[in-house]
Every structure is written in structure tokens, then in C-alpha cells.
Image: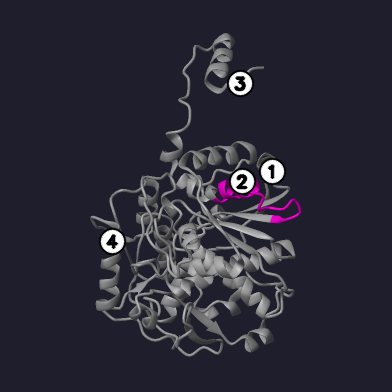
Amino acid sequence: MASSKTAPASTRLLALRCIRCGTEYAVGPMFKGCPACLARGLPTNLTVVYDMNKIRQRFNPRHLEGRPGTIWRYAELLPAEPENAVSIGEGMTPLLPVPRLAKRLGIRNLLVKDESRNPTWSFKDRLASSAVSMARQMGASVVTGSSSGNAGAATAAYSARAGIPCVMFTTRQFPLTMRVQMAVYGTKMIATPTIQDRWRMVEACVDSWGWFPVTVFVYPLVGSNCYGIEGYKSVAFELVEQLGRVPDQIVMPVGAGDAFYGTWKGFKEYRELGFIDELPTMVAAEVFGPLENALAKNLDHVEEVPWGPTPAISVGLNTSAYQALAVLRESGGIARSPSAEEMLAMQRQLAETEGIYAEVSSVISLCVAKKLVEEGKIKDDELVVAFLTSGGLKDPETTAKHLPEIPLIEPNLDALRSALESTYSFAF
């Protein structure tokens, strides 16, 4: 099969730079992170370096009239050239006040960034749009990845939009909704016995056949495709556009930390360009706490921690990537982990109070925001944005297990009143 070719010269892209050691490499198909750090046993992702002087001449966030309502309204700060953009309308998701829930949580100024409104109903569309656009620019013959959920669906959809074949490696143990969504886009799905096996298969295809990877596949984790992570910068750009300012704290669900790092980088680039003066505090909402562990031990890497079953399957990792740890240290942030019971209760609480049905993995941001209040780490005048990564219909089976069974009644008012009281504790 034909392999990916080096990206054509760009007037904006200068290099790929290691997040840890700062070593720079030519822009091209580098998907395993920094070779220098890998040789030292410290796997670390690369990030795209732009010519900021040229961007200043071409881009001003105060003058976005006539630009698309997608992440490509910020095209100068994305790696692919606009003519290679693969878009299905991703980005510009709602930033919603949640006053009833905020009152319960004790947060005066709480907003949620609802990423379920993206084309495949999750934040991964930002990653996929930017990554697959670079796959098109590099002349990739096949797009690939490893996923049992949101990343796989997004990669499949954007590959279909680009007209590039997609092969996704997965396991058999994942929700039917996710499986159907990936398959319907025409993805060639291949199952392997373990998660690690699927990562090894992606690596083999990248090394042997030159396929273009979008998702995580290097272990220990470095994160997803560095060009794809650039798509997450649009979260920061949108928040500034929607709010007219920078939030005080941003709480995000974190697995490998792709969106966490991308959002932070977006704010830093806006500050470098002179568009903002402040940066937010970034808070990681985890399932098993590997980042919290790394901070507590003052580690220069993220080690594995114990893990087990969790309803938050999309971010249910017992390790993370250095990129996420770097964000916490740079922003002065913290990491916290809720229990499974807290996640499931928050999913219902958000839906019942605000009419938003989010995936369990999404609401861990709100669980952690609640913990910050209890710990006195959110001030009364601070503006907090909680990131909701995807919609609840991605995994309805998990929600269904924790909902009451629908009562069957005789069709009369006495039976109705009794059922409402006994099943729903609803008296009137």
C-alpha cells in the first residue's frame, strides 16, 4: 500500500516540538512522540509550532464575520491548509448556564460546554476533523486507530467524509450503540483480544504500511495524533468568543489528556498572540486518579494505578500521558476522581434539573466541580466551565441499569396515584 508522504511546506507550520524536552523535528508523519525522550524511557508527545508573526497578520478573533461556524473559523491556528479541511459542522457547541444544578452544587457561576452537539455527538469530532484533514494533506492511503467508542465513531465519520478508507481496531466488549455508530460509516472494524493488542496492530500498520493513525496507540501513553490534538484548541478559542473573557477554572474529563492539553495550548497561543491576558486553572476529572497520584508523588511521568470496572468507559484509564501532567503543573491545577456512585447520581441529576442527558464519562467534570466546592477550591466569584464530552445515548445500557422499572397499572386514577407514589415518590 502507498504510504503517507511528508506534508507540503506550509507558510504557518515551522516544526514539531517535544512537549517535555523541546527538541524540534520537521513537520511530517511523526506519530509516536519524541524519539529523544522515548530513548530515555520518557514517552512524550510532540506539538505543532506555528509562525505566530504570520498568524498575527492574518487572524484577529474580533473579526470573524463570514467565517464558518466550525473549528475552521480559526483555520490559521490549525495545521492543515484550509483547502484540505474535512468538516461536518464540528465545533461552536453551546455554552449553557445550569442554574438549578449550580445551586445544588454551591457554584454561583457554572456553565457547561455541551460537546454532545457535535456531528457524531462527542468532543472527538474536533480531533478527527483536524487529524483527517492532515491525512488528506499528507496523501494518506488509509486512516486507522484503536477505539471502542467516541474516537472510533468520529474517526470513521470524518474518514468517510474525506473519502479515505478507515480501519479501526477494537475489542468485543463495548456498547452496542458505539459499535453500530462506527460500523455504519463504512469502517472496517477488526477486534483483538485485548486493548494492548489493538494498539500493537495500529503500530504495525503505521510502521509497515504507512497508515495514518488518529487515536492513542503508543504505550506508555503519549496521546493521540499531534495534528489531531490541535483541533481541541478550538475549545479555548470558542470559550473566549462566547464569554468575552477567560474562565477562572475549567474542569474536564481526562483520559490520555488530548483535549486537556489542546485546550490549554489554545489559551496559551491566544495569550502569545496578545488576544487575552489571563490563563485559566485547568482541573482534571479522572476515573482512577493517575494524575492525582503523579502530583502527590511529584513524579516526572504518569505511572499506572489500580483499576477496575467503571461506568465511565470513555475515560476509564488507569494511566495518562505526560501532556496532561504538564498542563496541571503549568496551570496550577489539580486532579480529582469521583466514585461510580457519584457519577451515576450526577448523570441523573444533570438530566433531571437541566434537561441534559450526558454520557457518564462526561459528568465526572461536574462531580469534581462539586468536590472543589467542598474543598473550598472554588471561590464564590469565580466562573467555572465544566466540559461535557458526549451524549448519554452513546451508552444507554449503563443508564438503564440504574433507572426504575416502568410500572404496569390498571387504567384508573387510583392505580396511577399509587404507582406514582411507590415508584417515583411523587405525591400530589
Q: Residue shown at 72%/53% (left/top)?
A: 379
Q: Residue shown at 57%/19% (left/top)?
A: 420
Q: Which mark is residue 426?
A: 3
Distance of mark 1 from mark 2, alpha carbons?
A: 8 Å
Looking at the rendering, the stretch of residues picked out in magenta corresponds to 365-383
Q: Are marks 1 and 2 in contact (CB under 8 Å)?
A: yes
- Closer to us: 84 or 313: 313
Please state which amino acid type lies under the numbered disc 3.
Phe
Residue 45 figure quarter: bottom left
Q: Residue shown at 47%/78% (left/top)?
A: 20
Q: Residues within 10 Å of mark 2 (few under 14, many from 20)?
A: many
Q: Which mark is residue 370?
A: 2
On-image quarter of the N terminus:
bottom left
Q: Give the mark toward the camera: 2 or 3.
A: 2
Q: Which badge, 4 or 1, is on the more N-terminal residue?
A: 1
Assign a secondary structure to mark 2: helix
- Closer to us: 373 or 130: 373
Please state which amino acid type lies under the numbered disc 4.
Gln
Assign a secondary structure to mark 4: helix
- Give residue 139's position: percent from left, percent from top: 38, 81
Q: Which residue is mark 1?
A: 106
Q: Which badge, 1 or 2, is on the more N-terminal residue?
A: 1
